[in-house]
Each structure stands twice: as structure tokens, then as C-alpha cells.
Image (cartoon, rainbow, N blue to C red):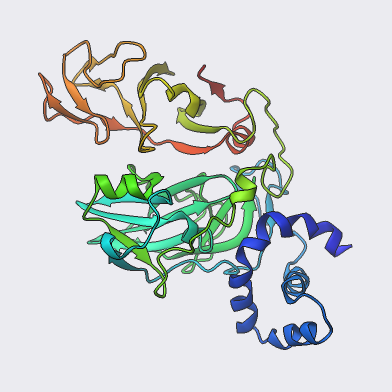
Amino acid sequence: MLIKKWGHILFVYYLPIFKTTFRFLRKRDITKHLLCAETNGMCPHFYVFLVLCSLVPEANLCWASTAILQKKDEIRYVLPRDGIPAIKSPEFVPASEAGLDDNEPVIGITINGESRAYSVYLLNHHEIVNDKIGDEAFAVTWCPLANLAVVYGREIDGNEYTFGVSGKLLKNTLVMFDYETDSLWPIVYGEAIDGKLSGMKLNNIPGSQKMPWGEWKALHPETLVLSYQGTKTIGYDAYKNYHGSERTGIHPVKNVDNRLRAKTNIIGIEVNDKYKAYPFSLFNNTKIITDEFHGLNLLVYRNNKTGTIMVYDRKIDGSVIDFEKNMDNATDNVTNTTWDLEGGIGIDGSMKGKTLRPVNFLAVYWFVWADYHPETEVFY
């Protein structure tokens, strides 16, 4: 019965992380069971799955009292805590030593003038990197089931926290925990929903990008690249079959919305508890989309070549800048200023040197966004 209940998870979620699972089991003196499995002719990988399932408790969610959860069954147990090991002490190498293929996706971030890249193929096996540049402590988070990357600051009220993989999912997305208080943090919210820090929010660090390594390296030749125990990349995408399939996570999607294909990549924006999605396909013939949404004048930018995404408030110094529909360059027709939209900075014209205010967004699969926000609007 247990196998039937969890069997579908094996193919979508467990296969990419068996190496991690072996390490987890080894720490708990379960290796003797693996030897027994091999002796009896059983596939040790599958035996790991059986043993792991026996360690997963039935969901007991009586603690889920926060208003951010609509029902007690919102969170699902998938793996034991730290079953996927977050990286706590990252190491880095220069770009020349990275060994990544130019087409390999990375998550890139620039903080205080220093750029770093994190291989998505490597993050598939860790999901969280606790990092620090200067005095800025941050966590690079990656949820392969949702195709979602978010970077959060790790400081709250002057206290620095270290995050790990809780083994739980909320609507098929990663839920972190912090080692200091055991509070739970879904990465979609960036807010603690259980524990001592319940209700506290992490600072979303804007500007992180998911793009091919070759593009990131060209834009930031001085970048450093994540290395974990001497490994810079796994060399393959453990979730390739998942991303190419119609499967939507490992748990049923509560709010199915057929306005878009489930795995359509979208840019999701929240303004005053109202939500809107901008499909990537909108940017096939333009880099810039302007919109007005619940009082906020938005500029949504995506460079299809590099994968760069930025969202800005178009109101600056009392003026709302505008662009011709579907124009590809970044010169507004109000102040005649040319903008570097990778950084939101005016580079020529009357507003040269001015900076547009960035707006937080999520780049994520549609089925996840719609499940969290069934009332969302869609820009067509």
C-alpha cells in the first residue's frame, strides 16, 4: 500500500537524487540494508526507495494554523529533512576553470559588484546555496519541479540564518527551513509559515537571472562559479524528462487553469494582493511590454537571447515613461531617454543616471502560479 501511494514520486522526484539519498542513509547506518538488498538480487536503488518511504511519516498538519495556508493539507511530506543537502559552505572558481557547457543553464547574481553563477544541473541535487558576498548573506534557491529560482537575503533583524531543504512541498514547490529555529519557509512566499519566526519575511534580492552559461559569462567575464566538493557541474539535467513531459509536479494540482498550457513559462507579478501573468511567448517579437496594473505602471523586460528578465515601475520623478508598442530598443517617448534595461539605468538623455525602481517577480511554470493564485489575470 505504501509503495502504491508513493510509487509515482519515484519517477518524478527521487530518481535525480539517489546519490544524495545514499549519503543520507549512510549517515543513519542503513547501509547494511543495501548490502542485504544486493545479496538478495534486489536493485539497491529501489531498496533505497523502500527504506526511504518507511522513514516518511504520514502527514500530520495540525500545526498549520497560519492564515497563509488555506487548508491543513496544503503541505506534503516528500523526503526526510536534509534528504536533499543544502550547500552551507560554498566554494568558487573563476570562469576559466568552470568547465560548463555554454548551453548549460546557470542562476546568476551580482551583488556589490561581484558576480557569481550557480549551475542549475548542480542545484538540482542541492536546491539551496547559503552564500555571502561582503556583508550580504543570501540564499540561492532552486525548485526544479516549478522551474523556479529565487534569491533571498538571509538576515532578519540583524540575525543571520542558514537554510536547508525541509523535505516538504507546498503546491509542488520547495519549502525551506532554517537551522536556527526550524521555521518553515516556502520559497514562493519568502515568509515563515510555521515556527518561531512565523510571519517574518525574507528580503527578495532582485536581479538574479537564469540563463545559459555562455551568455552569463559573456556579460560577466569576471564571474565566479559555484564549486561543491570539487564539482562545478553534474554535466546533465536530472529533470530533463520531467521538463519535457506534461507532468505537473508530484502532487495533484488543486487549481487547474487551462488558459495556458500547464508548463508555460510565465513572469508572475503581485500588486496589492492582485496577480498577473506574462507568458514568455509575449516576448518573441519584442523585449519590452508596458502595462498598468492596479495603480502601478509596469515595464516588463525579457531578452530572449540571454534570458534576462526585469520588471520595473515606469514612474520616475513624477513622470510615467512610455515606449512604442512592440519596440525593441529602450528609448522612451516621453523623456527621450535611452535605458539600459538590464540594470534599469538611464544611459543617455534627460534622465541619464536615473534608476528605475525594480518590482519583484517570479519566473515560474504556469501551473504553479495558477495553483497559488487562481484569480490571476493573464496579459495577452
Q: Looking at the rendering, in which quadrant would you find the N terminus?
A: bottom right
The residue sitting at 32% across, 42% down in the picture is 207
| Along the viewing direction, whichever of 35 and 158 lies nearer the viewer | 35
Task: Tell me: 65 left or right of 211.
Answer: right
Residue 61 can be seen in this image: no
Measured along the vertical axis of the image, is residue 306 above or below residue 162? above
Figure disc tally: 0
| Along the viewing direction, whichever of 149 and 43 lies nearer the viewer | 43
- Quadrant of the rendered image containing residue 352: top left
Q: Residue furthest right?
A: 1
Query: Residue 185: x, y in percent?
Result: 52, 54
The residue sitting at 60% across, 68% down in the picture is 81
The residue sitting at 75% across, 59% down in the picture is 59
The residue sitting at 45% across, 51% down in the picture is 200
Query: Residue 341: x, y in percent?
Result: 26, 30
Task: Tell me: 34 left or right of 269.
Answer: right
Query: Residue 113: x, y in percent?
Result: 19, 51
Residue 77 can be seen in this image: yes
Task: Tell me: 28 left or right of 230.
Answer: right
Query: Residue 367: x, y in percent?
Result: 63, 35
Measured along the vertical axis of the image, is residue 47 above or below residue 100? below
